């Protein structure tokens, strides 16, 4: 069950990355920062003796992508609500 949720979230994150491919934006920035943080966390896991955790890199990258998408949406919310 847990793996299925992460696969669905990863597919949604890939769709977001493809749709925001053309320009610099927070979606790709969130993904990049997520990969960097994921690598750091995986290295820490390896140093404490639990082995290098590849899934952590993917999970943190997915979360970073969604956070980037959220930051792209925040300025558009007042316009969607009809406020200026």
Image (cartoon, helix red, strand yellow):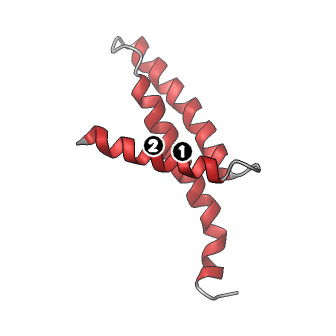
4 vs 72: above or below: above
Q: Does dot 1 land on a helix, a strand or a loop?
A: helix
Measuring from the top left, give residue 27's x and y in whole percent. Answer: 63, 50
| Circle 1 residues within 10 Å: few <14, some 14–19, many ≥20 | some
Residue at image coords 60%, 47%: 17
- Check whether the beta carbons of the residues at disc 1 and disc 2 lie within 8 A of each other: yes
Quadrant holding the C terminus = bottom right
Residue under numbered circle 2: 10
27 vs 37: above or below: below
84 vs 42: above or below: below
Residue at image coords 56%, 32%: 35
Quadrant holding the N terminus = top left
How many numbered marks does the figure carry?
A: 2
Of all residues shown, which one is farthest toward the right? 23
Frontmost residue, 75 versus 14: 14
Measuring from the top left, give residue 33's x and y in whole percent. Answer: 61, 38
Quadrant of residue 78 in the image? bottom right
* Image position of 33 (left or right of 22): left
Residue under numbered circle 1: 14
């Amino acid at each position: 069950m847990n793996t299925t949720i992460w696969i669905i979230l990863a597919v949604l994150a890939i769709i977001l990355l493809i749709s925001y491919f053309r320009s610099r934006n927070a979606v790709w920035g969130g993904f990049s920062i997520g990969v960097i943080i994921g690598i750091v966390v995986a290295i820490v896991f390896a140093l404490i003796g639990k082995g290098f955790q590849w899934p952590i890199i993917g999970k943190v990258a997915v979360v970073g992508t969604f956070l980037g998408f959220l930051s792209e949406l925040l300025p558009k919310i007042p316009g969607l609500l009809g406020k200026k």
